[in-house]
Structure formats: C-alpha cells, structure tokens
Image (cartoon, grey):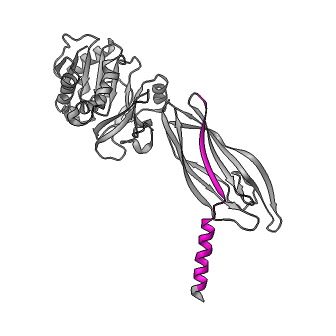
Amino acid sequence: MKFGVVVFPGSNCDRDMFDALSVDLQQEVHWLWHKDDRLTGFTPEDCIVLPGGFSYGDYLRCGAIARFSPMMQRVIEHAAAGGKVFGVCNGFQILCESQLLPGALLRNAQQQFVCRNVHITDPEGQVYRIPVAHGEGRYYADEATLDQLELNGQVLFRYCDADGMITESANPNGACRNIAGIRNAAGNVIGMMPHPERACSSSLSNLDGKSLFRKWILDASLVG
Amino acid sequence: MRLLISIAIVLISQVIHAQNPVSWQFQALKKGEQEYEVILRATIQPGWHLYSQQQPKDAIAIPTSFQFNNNPLVVRLKNVKEVGKMQKYTDKTLGVTAHQYSNEVNFIQAVKLRAKVKTAITGEIEYQVCDDEKCLPPKKIPFTIALNG
C-alpha cells in the first residue's frame, strides 16, 4: 500500500502527515495536488489522505469548497471503487461534505477553538493520547444515523478520559456521543478529528499516533 | 444569655447536620449485552424511615427522588423500581400518611448502553429521613456508577 497526501490551498498539516507516514512509519508517500484531475498510479489498495488545515480558507463552511476540487472528484471515485481514504480534521470535514461519510462537523459547543491533547478510545478499548486542534469539530448526526453507526460498528474513536471512560468532561467539543472518528459502512473510508500524525515521533514525546496508524490504517481496518 | 442561646442553636443545628441515618451504596449489575441494573441501596438506621418515590396525597414528607444527568450513550429503561418492604404509615397526631421504608431499600434503574463502551451514569438523589419524633432536613447526594460496556 502506498499513500497519497492531497494538498489543498490552506492545508497546513500536509507536511506533518507526509513526514509521519514516510519517516516515522516508513511508508511510500506521494504528494497529490488539488487541481490535478487524475490519480495516476493509485489502485484501491492505496490510501488517499486528506490532511488537516483550512482548505480554500474554509470559507462558506469547512470543507465545503474543497469537496468540489478536481482532485476530490477522483477521490470520490477512488472510494466508490473500494479504495482507501483517510481524513484528519479538515480532511474529516471534507469527507462529510463529500458525503463519503455521514454527518457533519459543527462549531465546537463552547464556541472556541480547542488545541490540546485529548484521549480517545477505539472499539477494542485501547486508549490513545492524541492532540486536537479545531474550531469546528463537534460531530453531529441525527439520532437515526447515530444508531445506524453504532449498529454497524462504524464509530471508531470516542473521546474519553485517560482510563478509557467516556464522560462528558472528556468531550472537548460537544460531539454527539463523544464521537471523534467514524468509518463508512464499507469500511474503506475513515475520518477523525484528532491528529495522529502529530503523535508519531519520540521527539514529540508521544507515539500513540503510530499505534493508531498501524492498527487502523496500515492493518486490516481499511478494507480495500 | 443571647450568646448562650446562639451557641445552643449552632450546636443543635450541627448535631442535626451531623446525623446521617441513611448510608448509600451504588452498583451496576450486568443483565445482558450492554444492559445493566443500576442499584442504589439505602441502608437505614433503626428507628428512622426513608420515603418512597410515590406518596399519598396527604403526605408531608419529601419523597425520595432521582435526577439522572444526561448521557447520550445511556438509555434509561422504565422508571426507578423500588425493592423493599414498604410500610403504609399513618401519623395519628398530624393526621397524615406516608409510604416509607425501614432498614433497607433498593432503588433499581434499568439502563441500556447504545454502544459497547466504558461510561458512567451520574446524578443526584434527594431524600429525607424521619423518626417518630422528628425529620431531618432534606439532603442531596451525588452518585457516579461505572458501566463497563
């Protein structure tokens, strides 16, 4: 599997993502430009990554303009063909705007940008300490959609305390049911608000992102 | 003299506040896949009474009540059930009646988790206790009960 990191005007976590994948995780990674209209050399076995940032200035609504970029048309096709797609923060917002994932990311409940380490837990109860940095990260979907996500096992990450306990106080943005990340029904598209690429190096005193990448991106989770 | 009366009032009120004839214990019993019975057990000292959630119309005692904090991952099923020997008490002096418990009563709330997660049900109990001569001021105590997926 190789990775393609899409660069939008306003992306600011693209290089962090590229370095985490190529240096810390020793993966083959390529740049993809938002204006390009093809995904040459990528197969459904490969993973397209939408990094964090403020694509197109996040005017109108976060991710709403990026969703119409030429590259996103190819990413949507890639996902429809079973190809792997992973979006972080603004990338998650773009995935929701593209309707590759259900729901939306709303302005944080406290109406303030939040930038700090949080804990998240996966369905197997493993706890990761991962940074968040967003103003519009409150995951929202209607109750029927949320119930469907639970039923299908599509909720991948929830905000929790250091012991893995899901509490209101551990929720940094008011997300519905503490949801921090989800996948689509087919399992090949994942989006999450926290930034695992910022927790992949011992020089950052945090390797939890590396565990998360290995378990949920490099291994069996993203079924191509 | 005024000073002595003031000191006496303060001391009496402190004694009343220090009295705690009910002790509470909390636990969650797993009843099925993501289903629990949350048990709030009141142990009542001899001579004291704790009141049921449902009281007759002429009752004057404050019924026990439960306020659960919203947790979107927890669905409460039905109302809080009472398991104990309820007494129908009539106070002939005051001409009022009450539904009350002595010794021990379990308040049981059935809940279901929306997902297989570790979370907690939290809230507050408000209750009052009386003996045959007096009632203590109503009291509120918080609770946090872990539910582990």
Q: Is residue A153 above or below residue B15?
A: above
Asked whether the viewer can see residue A91, the reply is yes
Q: Which residue is at the front of the view, A26 or A180?
A: A26
Image position, residue A73 (x, y; %): 25, 18
Is A210 displayed left or right of B48 in the figure?
left
Q: How many labels, in total?
A: 0
Q: Which stretch did the figure color magenta?
A: B4-32
Residue A222: image quadrant is top left
Q: Which residue is at the front of the view, A6 or A222?
A: A222
Is B57 displayed left or right of A221 in the figure?
right
Is B30 displayed left or right of A49 in the figure?
right
Is A126 displayed left or right of B34 in the figure?
left
Residue A194: image quadrant is top left
Image position, residue B9 (x, y; %): 61, 78
- Inspect the magenta stretch and tell me whether residue B20 lies in it: yes
- Inspect the magenta stretch and tell me whether residue A159 lies in it: no
Asked whether the viewer can see residue A7, the reply is no
Image position, residue B95 (x, y; %): 81, 65
**Residue furthest right as drawn:** B92
What residue is at 31 percent from the left and 31 percent from the top? A208
What residue is at 61 percent from the left and 72 percent from the top? B13
What residue is at 29 percent from the left and 23 percent from the top? A86
Q: Is residue B101 above or below residue B93?
A: above
Image position, residue A34 (x, y; %): 18, 23
Quarter occupied by the N terminus of chain B: bottom right
